[in-house]
Image (cartoon, helix red, strand yellow):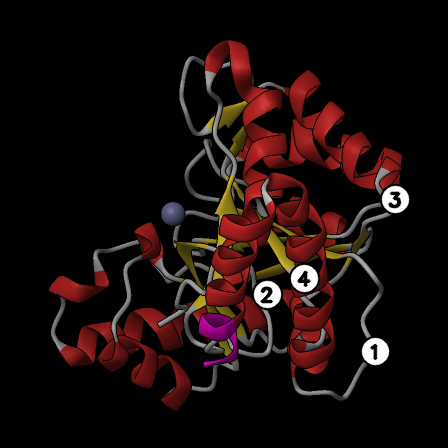
């Protein structure tokens, strides 16, 4: 309701006072939103880091520039546990918290992304498909996952085999969510409590099963920024794509545009 009010206020201010008010008013709304809603967490979503002609593959040099941009802008990378504790008010998050995530667990995450993340001292989270781990050569091995976990990377679940969950009967949804969790926990030796839905698809029913088998939260590909208005089982992310010539420009715009979701009162529901 507050957001709607501020959006109306902004519109009125614009009509009467021209565009200069737009900036200061928008800034003010942003400040108020910070106070009212607490931390806003940017969650980036990557897939492959490779020189492939594929929208999901970011060239390593571009990925390096994006990570440098985050560091230079004062962003601090956090883990899913910190995001969870921050949203629950149990932990004070840094001023510009960013959660860097990768889906699927491609081997290039180890060969190309990991050295860059280490170079900048950044944390990241990879949602892997454990049925492919140490089996399919396009995906990482258990040894690689363990080495990454010893160096600031968190491994979480992307289901056992990456099916379209919404097309499965309940018992299969449950086994995809539970068996991936168990397999990861056995091999990595720590609780696995976060999930990224394959293809980002989810509904209340799937979210309920995820919660029931022991997850604390799940990430979608719903484009937006996480804050205390977010649903723990429908966490927003900002997908980063390879857009040929304009990948860096698009990266800046995607990050910058995130603010306008709340400023204009757009719903998270
Ligand atoms: Zn996936």
Q: Is residue 47 above or below residue 35?
A: above
Residue 184 vertical placement versus 86 (above, below): above
Q: Residue at x 23, y 81 (%)?
A: 205
| Front disc: 3 or 2 | 3
User: In this view, which residue lies farthest toward the top?
Assistant: 245
* Position of residue 57 measured from the top left corner of the image (x, y, whole percent): 49, 25
Cβ atoms under marks 2 and 4 closer than 8 Å: no
Which residue has dot 1 on it?
92
Q: Residue at x 60, y 40 (%)?
A: 19
Q: Are marks 1 and 2 in contact (CB under 8 Å)?
A: no
- Which-is-in-front pick, marks 2 and 4? 4
Q: Nearer the viewer, residue 224 or 202?
A: 224
Q: Position of residue 264 (x, y in %)?
A: 48, 58
Q: Is residue 124 left or right of residue 259?
A: right
Residue drawn at 31 percent across, 50 percent down: 199
Which residue has dot 4 on it?
30
Judging from the image, what secondary structure is the residue with disc 2 in? helix
Cα distance between the residues tagged 3 and 2: 25 Å
Q: Is mark 1 within 8 Å of ligand 1?
A: no
Q: Which mark is residue 187?
A: 2
């Amino acid at each position: 309701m507050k957001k709607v009010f501020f959006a109306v206020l902004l519109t009125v201010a614009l009509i009467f006072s021209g565009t200069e008010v737009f900036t200061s008013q928008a800034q003010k709304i942003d400040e108020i939103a910070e106070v009212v809603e607490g931390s806003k967490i940017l969650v980036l979503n990557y897939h492959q880091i490779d020189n492939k002609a594929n929208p999901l593959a970011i060239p390593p040099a571009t990925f390096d520039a994006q990570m440098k941009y985050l560091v230079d802008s004062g962003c601090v990378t956090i883990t899913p546990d910190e995001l969870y504790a921050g949203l629950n008010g149990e932990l004070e998050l840094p001023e510009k918290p960013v959660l860097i995530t990768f889906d699927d667990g491609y081997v290039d995450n180890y060969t190309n992304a990991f050295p860059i993340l280490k170079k900048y001292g950044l944390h990241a989270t990879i949602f892997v498909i454990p049925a492919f781990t140490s089996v399919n050569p396009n995906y990482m091995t258990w040894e690689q996952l363990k080495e990454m976990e010893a160096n600031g990377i968190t491994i979480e679940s992307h289901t056992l085999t990456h099916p379209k969950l919404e097309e499965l009967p309940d018992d299969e949804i449950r086994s995809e969510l539970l068996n991936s969790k168990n397999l990861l926990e056995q091999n990595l030796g720590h609780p696995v409590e976060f999930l990224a839905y394959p293809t980002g698809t989810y509904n209340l029913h799937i979210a309920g099963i995820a919660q029931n088998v022991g997850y604390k939260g799940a990430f979608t590909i719903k484009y937006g920024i996480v804050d205390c208005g977010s649903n723990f089982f429908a966490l927003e992310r900002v997908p980063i794509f390879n857009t040929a010539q304009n990948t860096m420009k698009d990266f800046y715009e995607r990050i910058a545009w995130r603010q306008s979701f709340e400023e204009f009162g757009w719903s998270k529901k």
